[in-house]
Image: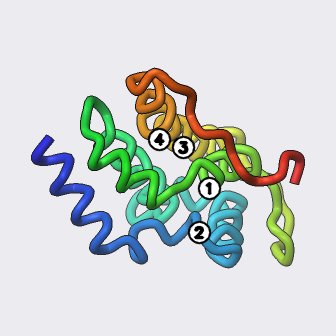
Amino acid sequence: KKNQDLMMRLIFEYEDSILYLCKTPEEKKKRFRMLVEKEHHRDIGSLLQYHVMIVKLLALCCKGKNPTTEIKASGLLSVDDVVNTLLDVAKCPEGCEDGPVSPHAIYMVREAYVIFLHNVYTETARRKGGAAPPPTAQQGS
């Protein structure tokens, strides 16, 4: 628990440089370009792999009964952010050049976000005896 709290504190301190591929439309365009360009295949220095590992690390910090880290993590990536990423990871954002995205790249990103969704929202709700909060984004958009 102590290590989980330490990791969350550090992630919050450096949030802008850690979670920069998932918040703004520009960042999402950059992530999509990386997926199309197969940036994740780089031997060293793949920003996409780094992003995926950070999302997984966030999810792991929320494993177990640690309400403080769960609240902090849900503040970093909302249910809407996670669901939209799961649904739209392979879609070309507006103003971005379209191109094919490999199934492996889609799986890699989705896997991290599914783990996050499970550990932060589903398991938390299950332990509390309720359901995870529904996404507020309009369906089908």
- Residue at the spot x=43%, y=27% of the render? 123
Q: CA distance from mark 2 to mark 3?
A: 14 Å
- Residue at the spot x=63%, y=74% of the render? 24
Is the C-beta separation of discs 2 and 1 under 8 Å? Answer: yes
Q: Return the residue at label 4.
A: 116
Q: Return the residue at label 1.
A: 81
- Name which quarter of the figure residue 114 lies in: top right
Q: Return the residue at label 3.
A: 113
Q: Position of residue 52 (x, y in %)?
A: 47, 51
Q: For this rendering, which residue is in front, 7 or 106?
A: 7
Judged left or right of residue 114, residue 12 is: left
- Name which quarter of the figure residue 95 lies in: bottom right
Q: CA distance from mark 4 to mark 1?
A: 11 Å
Q: For this rendering, which residue is in front, 126 or 39?
A: 126
User: Which scheme is used to colour this image of the protein?
Assistant: rainbow
* Residue found farthest to the right: 140
Q: CA distance from mark 1 to mark 3?
A: 9 Å
* Residue found farthest to the front: 129
Is the C-beta separation of discs 3 and 4 under 8 Å? Answer: yes
Q: Return the residue at label 2.
A: 23
Number of numbered discs on residues: 4
Residue type of the residue flagged with mark 1: Asp
Q: CA distance from mark 2 to mark 1?
A: 8 Å
Please report whichever mark, 2 or 3, sits nearer to the chain's N-terminal start: 2
Pointer 4 local density, CA inside 10 Å: few below 14, some 14–19, many at least 20? many
Residue type of the residue flagged with mark 3: Tyr
- Residue at the spot x=62%, y=55% of the render? 81
Q: Quadrant of the N terminus?
A: top left
Q: CA distance from mark 3 to mark 4?
A: 5 Å
Residue type of the residue flagged with mark 2: Lys
Pointer 2 local density, CA inside 10 Å: few below 14, some 14–19, many at least 20? some
Residue type of the residue flagged with mark 4: Phe
